[in-house]
Image (cartoon, rainbow, N blue to C red):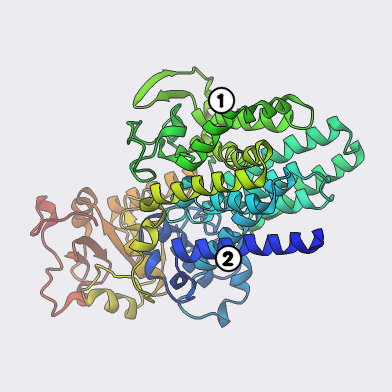
Amino acid sequence: MPTRHADIWGNLAALLLGLIAFLLFVGWQTLIPANIGWLDSGDRAMHTLGWMFFRETGWHSPPGLSPDLGIELSSSIAMVDGLPLFALPLKLVAQWLPQPFQYWGDWFLLSFCLQSLFAYGIARQLEAPRSLALLAAGFALITPAFLFRVPMHMALSGHWTILAALYLYVRREPPKLWMWPLLVALTASIHAYLLAMVGAIWIAALVERLWSGRLGWGRAVAEFAVAVVATLIVLWLAGFFMGGSLGSYGYGSYKLNLLWPFLTYGRWSRLFPDLPHTKYDYEGMSFPGIGILALLALALFSGALASLTSAIARRWLPLALMLVLMMVFAFSEKLAFGSTELFTVPLPKWASELASTFRSTGRFIWPLLYFITTGAVVLMARRWQVAVALPLVFVAFAAQVVDSRHGLFDFIHRIGPPATSWATPFVSPFWERAAAAGYRHIRAIPVINPGRDWKELGYYAVTHGMDIDSAYLGRNNDAAMDALRATDAKMLATGDFAPDTIYELDMDSAVEASAHLAPDDLLAIIDGRIILAKSGAKLVAGLGIDSRPGFGGGLLPTPWSPL
């Protein structure tokens, strides 16, 4: 078979492998556009509500702005990790889409297929035979760090962007002028963490091509300028700059553990013991799997690792240094070995604040992890003939599938039957009466991020044409949050509540508000929440709900806890 045709068939086989993995680990039900039932928990609900609100609001400047979710808090589709790559174009045709509508199943299908395709491409560029390159793609598809991310942070599961960046770096033929700018700008429309990793690999690629003479300074400047300008435009369109402070809490906690190659977190190996670790270092979960570890051990004892001396050559040194630098950043300022915090590296305040922009530093091990994963297969291909290497790698792959099967199939086993709505704890007729009576805003006092009841209140709001300040946003706008809290404090002190707004209060706020109520105002326990509505007493008529239960005494007639 001609080489060109064989390459086409190899790429198609890699795509098919990605499709099979998607069907096995995620499931075809997620492709049903109106099926939102599997998106009702955790961060998946955050991302989905972000799209729901964004779809219903009008266009603003920047286009990614989503003011109805997080009133006054400068929310955008980027700040809820809502995948602007899909959300922005789909909003253009929103009036023709079914209600509800979700695109996350399509995103997962694309991610699995491209994960496989680019891993295959990397192995082929490193001269692995097609059969072994397909096994390298298979390993990329069962990488625990990838499948662990899929059900949790959906946009962040686009690990194929990292593999695409590695592919462009290892290409024997230098990439076209447009390839890097396209990848970097495209990644900017997916997730900021992926953008940082792809951007770092791109910088390494620029240095390598300039150093080796494969790229002239004129073309390098042009590539850099186009990529930066295109990326800034994409970030603006998505509303990435609307979040106020880019830093956040958690830097030094969501890190990489020094034992990272051996930490299974109780899910990804039955053979390896579940070693202790620090509380939040799951963000650096990067266990390669027993198959990859076995191949690395075999490469070590067979002498195949000797070929890695080329890492210090001009062709590979920039990438090797960048991968190591990202790993060092992943460890953060607090080094931990297992469950033991060893020491903290003293950083100046400005450096710590800058580093907190990417608080979950543990994620920055992913580029090195994928290079190790594909590289382990390539080392086998270089050390032995296909007749020997192929069965060895296949046995390692099969062993890893069996050993990691609990983690591999965990998500699809937890997905329920298709559903076009979410279950809600709001069962009182009050809620429908309030919507029919013209209440158009929902506020929580005090306002925090994530907001109290952000999912339940958010779903009620978006399905009833309301906006809401109680939200779960990726970053705080500290100035806007402080201003909103000051407004709430003044409102509690004066009783000047808006007539078209439903307020959910905590106990202290309820006690303070109770001193300023008019006879027809509502302050009641409804479905376990303390609810205030100006002129809303009539909304609970005939429901057996006391519209003035005496909060001033500091006692509640029934136990209350926010859900």
Disc 1 marks a residue whose amino acid type is Trp
Going 39% across and 52% down the picture, which residue do you hit?
405
Residue type indicated by callout 2: Ala
> Mark on residue 442?
none
* Quadrant location of the C terminus in the rendered image: bottom left
Asked whether 488 or 135 is in front, the reply is: 135
User: Would you place residue 215 above or below residue 6 in this image?
Assistant: above
Residue 552: in sight, yes or no? yes
Disc 1 marks which residue? 350
* Depicted 544 relative to depicted 287: above or below: below
Quarter occupied by the N terminus:
bottom right
Residue 451 horizontal/vertical position (percent) = 36, 53
- Of circles 2 and 1, which is in front? 2
Mark 1 falls on what kind of element? Answer: helix
Q: Looking at the rendered structure, which numbered label has been put on residue 87?
A: 2
Q: Is residue 469 left or right of residue 207?
A: left
Of pointers 2 and 1, the one earlier in the residue sequence? 2
Q: Nearer the viewer, residue 497 or 509?
A: 509
> How far apart are the two marked residues, 2 and 1, measured between alpha carbons?
35 Å
The x, y position of residue 306, in whole percent, is: 66, 26
Foreground pick, 295 / 241 = 295
**Viewer-side residue, 284 vs 392:** 392
Question: Does residue 119 show up?
Answer: no
Q: Position of residue 231 (x, y in %)?
A: 71, 50
**Looking at the image, is 558 positioned above or below residue 191?**
below
Q: Are marks 2 and 1 in contact (CB under 8 Å)?
A: no
Q: Secondary structure at mark 2?
A: helix
Residue 177 lies, in percent from the top left, at: 84, 49
Quadrant in the picture for residue 280: top left
Q: Is residue 115 above or below residue 320?
A: below
Q: Residues within 10 Å of mark 1 (few under 14, many from 20)?
A: few
- Residue 413 falls in image quadrant: bottom left
